[in-house]
Image (tube, grey):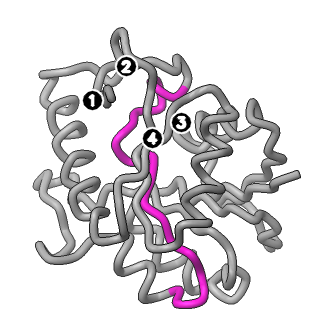
Amino acid sequence: MTKATIFGRGNMGVAIADILVAGGVEVSHITTATESAIVDGDIVVLAVPYAALDGIVTKYGSQLGGRVVVDITNPLDFQTLKLVVPTDSSAAAKLSRQLPGSRVLKAFNTTFASALISKTVGPNPTTVLIAGDDADAKTALASAVIDGGIEAFDSGDLTAARELEAVGYLQLRLAMEHKISFTGGFSLTK
């Protein structure tokens, strides 16, 4: 059985856990209230704000080697509503440099928690876009997501994380400006 460790127990952490559990994955959570924790998941999901990534790398980086590490963050400054990573990079690329022994993926950042829970965006099935350099890691995450009842789509190598973060940024900005709801969002049809 596949195991997943999810950092964070907010809306996204819980929604992702529900999808993974529905697909037969054993899930554990690590939160800021956790004193000392062992990362035991084959798949590790960082369902935390972008600003928390450096602290997780510092505290748990030695436990993340060889694991599939999924960055769901949208690297935003919520005061200015601007992306805070260089235009030629991404949060996932930075994380990959910080964790060279891990198989870093970008996923879930273009999907609101409500779309994971309902498994739909409007009339379309919810689709998780996945970017990463490790084909086996992408397949493992996609299988877990599909087994959990939603769609997954390989968006390319890790350089595509920049575009996924831009889509996530746009979706969040539109929702924060009340132009779309947090139950809406983008969908992918094939």
Q: Where is residue 48 drawn, in percent x and y? A: 50, 56
Amino acid, disc 4: Val
The answer to whether residue 144 is left or right of residue 82 is right
Could you classify mark 1 by the number of other residues whose Cα lies within 10 Å: few (under 14), some (14-19), or many (20 or more)? some
Is 58 placed above or below 74 here? below
Q: CA–CA distance between discs 2 and 4?
A: 11 Å
Question: In this rendering, which labeled residue sits more in front, label 4 or label 3?
Answer: 4
Q: Secondary structure at mark 2?
A: strand
Point out the image quarter for the C terminus. Answer: top left
Q: Residue furthest front?
A: 190
Do residues under tags 2 and 1 come within 8 Å of each other at their CB atoms?
Answer: yes
Part of the protein shown in magenta: 99-116
> Would you say residue 111 sits in the magenta stretch?
yes
Is 48 placed above or below 142 here? below
Decide which of 65, 29 is in the foreground and name it.
65
The residue at which mark 1 appears reads as: 186
